Amino acid sequence: MYTLHIEHAIHDFDTWRSAFDRDPAGRRAAGVRHYRVSRPVDDPNYVLIDLDFDSPTEAETFVGAMRAVWQSPAAAPALRGAPQTRIVETVESKDL
């Protein structure tokens, strides 16, 4: 499993969430298997998104699609600053 981890500051969570839910990059068609949205408990204007893929190539391709989305104020109306991205490989996952 490969995860595209994205972090960025936002102006307003509800505005950001509405744009996220519109899914301008087409998560399912791009190969996203599962996603998680998180916020730091001490900063409601910051989001962390983890998108799971079967391959690193799918994740890399999706980063390119998201960069195009982030360039559009209409598609990313709440974005504040440049998002940080990283693709990571899960080497172990265990329920305790």
Image (cartoon, rainbow, N blue to C red):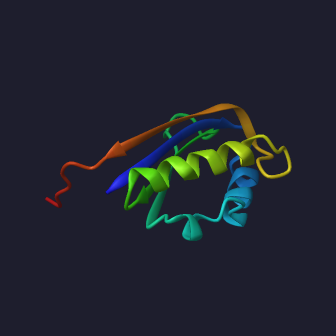
Query: Foreground residue, 39 or 30?
Result: 30
Q: Quadrant of residue 8?
A: top right
On the picture, is 69 further left or further right than 91?
right
Query: Foreground residue, 49 or 27?
Result: 27
Whether residue 71 is visible, yes or no, is: yes
Q: Position of residue 55 (x, y in %)?
A: 38, 56
Vertical placement of residue 28 versus 7, above or below: below
On the picture, is 37 further left or further right than 54?
right
Q: Residue at x 16, y 58 (%)?
A: 94
Residue extending furthest toward the right: 74
Q: How many marks?
A: 0
Q: Position of residue 49 (x, y in %)?
A: 51, 49
Q: Residue at x 67, y 58 (%)?
A: 20
Q: Residue at x 79, y 52 (%)?
A: 75
Q: Residue at x 31, y 57 (%)?
A: 1
Residue extending furthest toward the bottom: 29
On the picture, is 1 further left or further right than 15?
left
Query: Foreground residue, 17 or 32?
Result: 32
Q: Position of residue 70 (x, y in %)?
A: 73, 43
Q: Position of residue 22 (x, y in %)?
A: 72, 65
Quarter of the figure that contains the C terminus: bottom left
Whether residue 11 is visible, yes or no, is: no
Residue extending furthest toward the left: 96
Q: Quadrant of residue 18?
A: bottom right
Vertical placement of residue 69 versus 53, above or below: above
Residue extending furthest toward the front: 57
Query: Foreground residue, 15 or 75?
Result: 75
On the picture, is 6 further left or further right than 9?
left
Vertical placement of residue 43 versus 51, above or below: above
